[in-house]
Image (spheres, grey):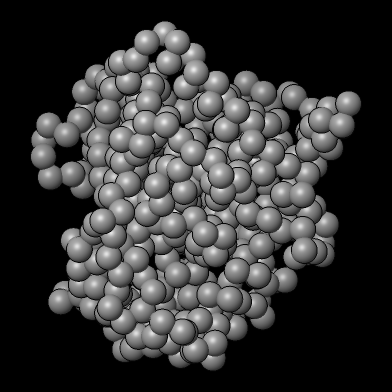
Amino acid sequence: MATKEVTVESEDTGVEVRIIGDPVGKGLFATRDFKSGEVIFEERPLVSCQFLWNAAYGYLACDFCMRPLETAEENACRLTQNPQLTLPYPECCDTKKDAVVECPYCDASYCSRDCRESAWNQYHETLCLRSFMPDPSHPLVMLQEAWKWWGLQPDTYHCQGSASQKKIRTNEVEYGQMHYPPETACIMLLARIIATVRQAADKEGATALFMQFCHRTVNEEEEIAHKLLGAEFHDQLEALRVMMEKGLGAPEVQHWLTPEGFRSLVALVGTNGQGIGTSPLSRWVRNCDALEISAAEREKLDQIVDDMYVQLEKEAGGFLNNEASGLYPLQSSCNHSCDPNAMPTFPYNNFHLVMTAVKDISAGDEICVSYLDECNLSRSRHSRITILRENYLFTCRCTKCEEQTGDPDVTSEEEMDEDEEEEDE
């Protein structure tokens, strides 16, 4: 019988973490019934960080909580590349521009003084470059630049965006065609973990918080290694480690700055990072939907929104959000299913995660989410398993995968080629 490891403090939270045993490890289980659409739990990340390319392309977000710093109209003008575009009902925009503040020592921006103070107290005092014109030779600046290019792996799977935005599926990366690249991890999330431990009063306790996440670099039972840790990336990974050590080395974090320790930290972020998405435009649209206006005004507004999204699809493809990655203790306890019963959402338009039931869940059921985005979740069993093995070090044996055992082993490249052929017709 499985033993329980309850990590929530209150008895009425409705969930508990249980040790399942090898090879799964642990899982999150419901201790009461949840109806579809009901909130299961809410939590904030231990640490989070915006993706580097996302920030480089002008997606403005609070450097602590990821709340948008652009207004909906500014966001729409930038993404459509139409500076003349205007949006009605500006009162439906949630962005409070007058509350935005900056770090007094560098160019980091925050949605509020509280976020600035929280970032400084947790990690930014250590990471702040103390310059508005960063030195290109600074180890942390070099670290970010090295990651932005090394992180663009040619085997990344995605299906959104125009032809110029599609990922090249060859062994060579042609950087000129990389536009709004799909990112799944960020080297600065590792840096913030290290800085958090360095600044913590209880350094051992802070280290233990992060070590609760799965951080194995290989699945020895199935002979799977994380794709970021392949032999072909050994030299690049070592270069990143050296930069990290030069920028953030200290006795209390040295265990993460050895070659093997750094690999485990990369694996921790790679396998546990939860994507975060925020958008001033989507909030504006949602708030507009709630307006009490005449039928004629509603028809006019709907046309404006429809026309805007056509232009957004043309210019930005599927890359509309501020995007980041964060480490969430409860969310990371949820195992994967290709037929999930729960889904993480971000209704507050910041890093605050709300786990919502997408099916009725009974007490005793395991709460499972999809580690795959909607696009990849719709692909063949073979493609899904390939992605999960490379990124999360396991072979999926969920009900959906078991039911599709006899399906043809169609690869993602074959499926993508079929999609492109359909688009060309």
Residue 259 in view (yes/no): no
> In which quadrant will I find the C terminus?
top right
Q: Is residue 334 left or right of residue 150?
A: left
Height in image: 158 above or below 339? below
The residue that appears at 77% across and 63% down in the rendered structure is: 176
Q: Nearer the viewer, residue 342 or 220?
A: 342
Q: Residue at x 79, y 28 (%)?
A: 408
Q: Against 326, is 189 above or below?
A: below
Q: Position of residue 260 (x, y in %)?
A: 50, 77
Q: How many marks?
A: 0
Establish if 74 lies above or below 99: above
Residue 345 coordinates in the image, percent (x, y): 38, 36
* Quadrant including the N terminus: top left
Q: Position of residue 341 (x, y in %)?
A: 41, 25
The quadrant where residue 94 appears: top left
- In the image, taking residue 27 as reference, residue 228 lies left or right, namely right
Identified at 72% across, 49% down, the residue is: 165
Regarding residue 422, the answer to whether it shows in the image is yes
Residue occupying image coordinates x 68% and y 56%: 179
Q: To which quarter of the image does residue 315 belong?
A: top right
> Eyeballing the image, is 120 above or below 415?
below
Near-viewer residue (253 or 315): 315
Res 294 → quadrant: top left
